[in-house]
Amino acid sequence: MDEKLRFVFEYERDEASMKALCERFGISRETGYVWLRRYRQSGPEGLVEVNRAPLRHPNQTAVSIEESVLVHRQAHMTWGPRKLKRILERDQPGRVWPATSTLGETVKRAGLVAPRRKRRRTEPYTAPLAHAVESNLVWCADFKGWFKSGDGTRIDPLTITNACSRYLLRCQAVEKTDTERVRAIFEAAFRQFGLPWWIRIDNGPPFASSAVGGLSRLAVWWIKLGIVPERIEAGHPEQNGRHERMHRTLKLDLRPAEDWRGQQRELDRFRHDYNQVRPHESLGMHTPASVYEPSPRPYPAQVPEVEFPDTMLVRTIKSHGHFRWKKHDVFLSEMRWGERVGLLPEGCLMNPGLGATLPADALPPERATFGGRMTRKRCFQKGSLFKRGTRKKVWVARWWEPVIGPDNVPGRIRRSEVLGAVGDIATKREAMQMLDDLLRKVNSGDFRPQADWTFRSFVEDRWKPDVYPTLKFSSKKFYDNMVDAHLMPVFGDTQLRLLTKDRVQVFLTAKA
């Protein structure tokens, strides 16, 4: 500022030319004339530096668009920019909306974003719900953690969702978390939406109990309706992750009310917004209501009784949990008083639950599983995945597969299969998905009796496709010679269950 005034004053004294003054002050003649013109127009204030930023940006977001974004954000403070953009495009389809990142910056500049600490997150575990491929195959149920309303009343919301479409079927506060109240809510849901095939629950009451098989009276009622209670492992809520993620949204969006009735109205408001308004990213930004379809299985007018085959001895549980067996009282469970149970000799196959075979239409064919004795152990297998090979590494899957021998004796054998080269399968998640597809048939209970395999069929169907591609070139030549020239002519037609390791070693020693 001072240098500019000195330049103007010396020029006004007319002691030097414009060219000489500009050379002395180190500026161009164009700049000198600009300073002189601004001084003559505005005086000393004209020499103050002005902002050189353009007054208008061609890519600047319109004010009306920013106002619309902020209005929707203030109405839904837990919704991110992707959901906001989806809602704006749905409400005003003829308008061009900016990118998702631009919407996020607009909300952030307005101070409507609460910063969160970054956390290291693990890869989501979704394998247990891999069979939830369509509506009403799997329902998920749980109690949201209790809280208090404005007048101190305890609120225990019972939530029921459809696993595939994420549709929130029920969000109901109960006065007490007992079997009678929970059953009434499930019965209303069954009458409105139909029956599912499975209900995924945790191990707490009233869904489960410490009785034989872990079944409660609520679970027995489900089984009679042809619904399989599917319990997660204790301490593993990620196995019901879709439902727990809904609970997180409920916790963030739910507003406190003054009393129990007001809180139930807030729960109904959340259920409507969650199903009808809020888009879901896993559904391609569609709402759960646009994806969900009611079940074709209606709720029966009368609960059917469990049918028992002729090979079972049927007994009725008395009021104290006992039944009569050979003139003795045998205790089973007080949870099942008044129910009938079927008895089988130990070691026989039966369906888990009531110790009886369920009706033919109680389970879909692809999920009619067998189980051992009535225990809490799951029949679901995840399998294992590892890499094998030195030069060309491949993904290998391994799992235990149940089989039924020719004498109807159940057993299991270890299976392995090469999924593909590591270079062809980009990520481990993709390999895990291929493993899940392999195990879907195994987990569905489709047992394949293969006890009559011969050594030749094992080599052709299992060993050559799975193990042979992972060997080195020198090892391949060795095994080609040993298997084709020595073992196959002698043991080719021998049943695999009769071929022991000692027998093969004795043969190879004699050949040497």
Image (cartoon, grey):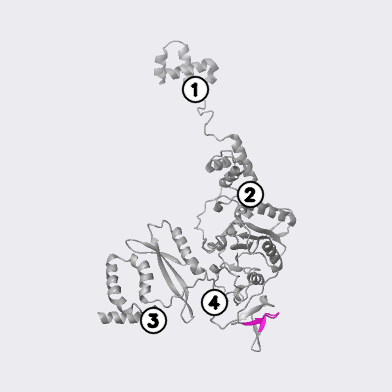
Residue lying at 62% horizontally and 78% vertically, measured from the top left: 308
Would you say the residues marked 2 and 1 are in contact, meaning their CB atoms lie under 8 Å apart? no
Tag 4: amino acid = Gly
Task: Residue under label 3, please give it.
Answer: 498
Task: Residue under label 4, please give it.
Answer: 372
Q: Mark 2 vs mark 1: give the one in front.
A: 2
Residue lying at 36% horizontally and 76% vertically, measured from the top left: 455
Q: Mark 2 vs mark 3: give the one in front.
A: 3
Dot placed on the residue nearer the N-terminal end, 1 or 3? 1
Q: Residues within 10 Å of mark 2 (few under 14, many from 20)?
A: some
For residue 173, above or below residue 208: above
Query: Which residues, given as a range, are shown in magenta?
Result: 313-323
How far apart marks 4 and 1 lie (CA) works out to 93 Å
Q: Secondary structure at mark 4?
A: loop
Q: Residues within 10 Å of mark 4 (few under 14, many from 20)?
A: some
Residue closest to the eye, 339 or 393: 339
Q: Mark 4 vs mark 3: give the one in front.
A: 3
As drawn, is 83 to the left or to the right of 263?
left
Q: Is residue 177 visible?
A: no
For residue 145, above or below residue 374: above
How far apart marks 2 and 3 lie (CA) works out to 64 Å
Task: Residue under label 1, please give it.
Answer: 1
How far apart marks 4 and 3 lie (CA) works out to 26 Å
How far apart marks 2 and 4 lie (CA) works out to 46 Å
Dot placed on the residue nearer the N-terminal end, 2 or 1? 1
Task: Residue under label 2, please give it.
Answer: 277
As drawn, is 227 to the left or to the right of 264?
left
Would you say the residues marked 1 and 3 are in contact, meaning their CB atoms lie under 8 Å apart? no
Dot placed on the residue nearer the N-terminal end, 4 or 1? 1
Dot placed on the residue nearer the N-terminal end, 4 or 3? 4
